[in-house]
Image (cartoon, helix red, strand yellow):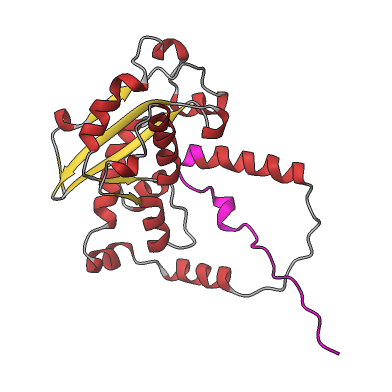
Amino acid sequence: MRQIFLDTETTGLRVEDGNRILEIAAVEMIDRKLSAPDRHLHRYINPGRDSEEGALNVHGLTTQFLSDKPKFAAIVDEFLDFVKGSELIIHNAPFDVGYLNMELEKLGRGKIEDYVECVTDTLKMAKDLWPGKRNSLDALCDRYEVDRSGRTLHGALIDCELLAEVYMAMTRGQDSLLIDFAPTLEEAAADALRRKERPPLIRAQASAEDLALHQAYLAELDKINKSDCLWREYEPKPEPAATENPQ
């Protein structure tokens, strides 16, 4: 089986705001063995615009550095040939897939799903394995003891390499997962306390403007963590509407 670990860096958080891809990396694995580095794909891309301040703080790729790099259109054939027919493995896949599809659609090339066998989201996998835990790439590296000491800024290639190691650990035999990563008694007790039912809180209704600002801030945290930020784990769910008892 040919699997490709993929990551992108972008000029900003929201594709709807006209942001673009400025770095893309893809690391090949065949039959659970990583290919040699010369079989990996890593390209910087001139996005044709400046990065938002928050995004620049994450990846550190300046407009000046990217000014002589190729446009996405110049590397699209190479990229599609590389990933064609593979299983794409991405952490927080909806983010990267959204940007890839935007870039492909601008060139009349359809969607990334048209070229690959399937897309696997390791964030969803991690949430299924570790409900209620932090599941950012950094958190998973710590949990599975993957060395990330060489990573200072977010970069697409190093994030792909870290993700490959995390994925290998997450998909080992179930017995070894239970032995090496079973929660401690203290963690189990803390989980039980979190699950305990509590009476509903009385909450003041936030304005639409406040909610929009709050969601924008959370989206920035999501991008930095490459996963849902911790706040989203505890966001209150909408309560069902009350019904009147028949007289």
Image quadrant occupied by the C terminus = bottom right
At 64% from the left and 44% from the top, the residue drawn is: 215
- The answer to whether residue 149 is seen in the rendering is no
Left/right placement of residue 234 relative to residue 153 reads right
Image spot of residue 129 (x, y percent): 37, 62
Tell which of 178 and 4 is nearer to you: 4
Left/right placement of residue 14 relative to residue 68 reads right
Image spot of residue 220 (x, y percent): 56, 37
At 44% from the left and 45% from the top, the residue drawn is: 94
Left/right placement of residue 189 relative to residue 9 reads right
| Residue 196 occupies quadrant | bottom right
Image spot of residue 96 (x, y percent): 41, 39
- In the rendered image, the residue lying farthest to the right is 247
| Residue 89 among magenta residues | no
User: Is the magenta region chiefly helix, strand or loop?
Assistant: loop
At 56% from the left and 23% from the top, the residue drawn is: 53
- In the rendered image, the residue lying farthest to the front is 108
Image spot of residue 172 (x, y percent): 22, 59
Left/right placement of residue 226 relative to residue 203 reads left
- In the rendered image, the residue lying farthest to the bottom is 247
The span shown in magenta is 223-247
At 37% from the left and 57% from the top, the residue drawn is: 125
**Taking 111 as reference, is 107 above or below it?**
above
**Taking 129 as reference, is 16 above or below it?**
above
| Residue 225 among magenta residues | yes
